[in-house]
Amino acid sequence: MAESKFSALILAAGKAVRFKSERTKVLHPLAGMPLGAYVLRAAQAGRPERIYMVVGYEGARVREAFACDGLKFIHQQQQRGTGDAVMVARPELEKCPSPSLIVLVGDAPLLSGETLTSLVEFHTQSGSSATVLTTRLENPHGYGRIIRAASARVRAIIEEKDLTPAEKKIREVSSGIICFSRRELLDHLDELTDTNSQREFLLTDMVRILGRRRRKVLAFSVANSREVLGVNDRVELAKVEKIIRRRKAEALMRGGVTITDPKSAIIDEPVEVGQDTRIEAGVQVLGRSRIGANCHIQPYSIISESVLGDGVTIRPFCVVNRSELNPGATIGPFAHLREAAVIGPEARIGNFVEVKKSTIGRKSKSMHLAYLGDAVIGEGVNVGAGSITCNYDGEKKHPTVIENGVFVGSGSMLVAPMRIGRGAYVAAGSTLTEDVPAGSLAVARARQVNKERWADEHRKARNATANSAAPPSRRNQT
């Protein structure tokens, strides 16, 4: 409805002091996304007219991480508190068309768009000048307390350092998220001061200021405390990550994915998985990976920023990073696909095979102990055990092209740049430095010479030397 229109202002300028980190808090990774991305997503889900984000510390990195359509960045040169952040945003807020403005903290990753929508509706229908999103905690230590008047209106928000002994017993706390009448916020914003224990301009002081002006300030309380509270240190970050991962696993299972051990599987928030895929114990699926339908991801494999087509099998203990597996492909166990590996339909990559920046064609296979780097391999190719594309000459990387139907015997060294023509054979143990024509047999190894009785004579000589070197007492005993 028109009267519930709002805009959102996300405060993301501060440094992660309690994180003890040189990285700003909103950029810390959380289940595959930056911490601040969850708040931005919640704001977007509420469908605001405009979204602003105040940035400061590591501002360039924050802009790069969160840049998207409809988001306006505002720079806070000096971080002097939440109230100062809103003051810095004032020129943009003056131009904002929305009657209501939600000010959001950047470190509340479990916040939902539904909660924001409910907050705005309550704020609008009640006709209040400000509505504070609150919750109740068994142990409220460290949080600003909600001080209510006899009428149940909110009279003030008092930070932990400024509480009296009686006020410390109050269990209702502020989330730091407040919905304002945009016009009244701007009319009284200049009344904020830094006369507090933090020596900062605190936006929560607007509650007391509006109260003195006899404006209505209310609280909108949520039962799920975790949804609205910020992440203050790495211990809380780990707790929240566990919650997010559990929710993700449950959502996937309800969508038709089998996860045999949700407690041990690590699946990032942005991951997509198709129906009837099976994910077994200890598997990690990270980043923005996409897994198709009817796949089987076996124990302790790690898939990061990769795309798997339908019917792919990943056997145990594989590592797949920034790669693509086409439908029906099989890898592992103990295979390693590095950046830009593309495995074709029904191709097979086996035990201890490493593939980097290479394309493997349909139904081709390399089953044992091989390295395939900077290669283009056609369809129906067999690469024997222990074979290597020698792609690096000490200065530059060079390509290897293996055309359709080639058979590469075990233990072959293919020194790039080179091309092996269609249907050619490479004899086992060959070291190739030149191209191989189509349909040819390439043999590049020394002729075998057998020296009869050499091993027996060598063994006798070795034993004689050992005996002559033994102590005299030992020679007398033998």
Image (cartoon, grey):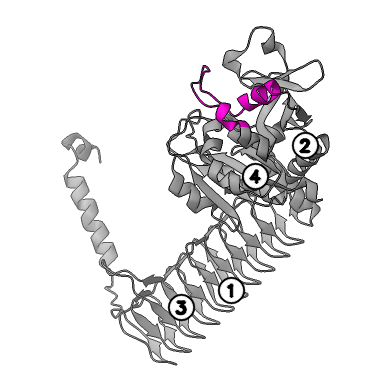
Camera-side residue: 43 or 83? 83
Q: Tell us which disc is closer to us: 1 or 2.
A: 2
Q: Secondary structure at mark 2?
A: helix
Q: Disc number at residue 123?
A: 2
Dot placed on the residue nearer the N-terminal end, 2 or 4:
4
The amino acid pointed to by label 1 is Ala
The amino acid pointed to by label 2 is His
Q: Tell us which disc is closer to us: 3 or 1.
A: 3
Alpha carbon distance from label 2 to label 4: 14 Å
Crowding at dot 2, Cα within 10 Å, few <14 / some 14-19 / many 20+, comes out as: many
Query: Taking 111 as reference, is 405 left or right?
Result: left
Indicate the position of residue 381 as horizontal and vertical percent values: 51, 80
Q: What residue sits right under mark 4 in the picture?
A: 8
Alpha carbon distance from label 4 to label 1: 50 Å
Q: What residue sits right under mark 1 in the picture?
A: 347
Alpha carbon distance from label 3 to label 2: 62 Å
Where residue 30 sits, quadrant-wise, is: top right
The amino acid pointed to by label 3 is Val
Query: Taking 463 as reference, is 381 left or right?
Result: right
From which residue to which does the magenta span run? 188-213
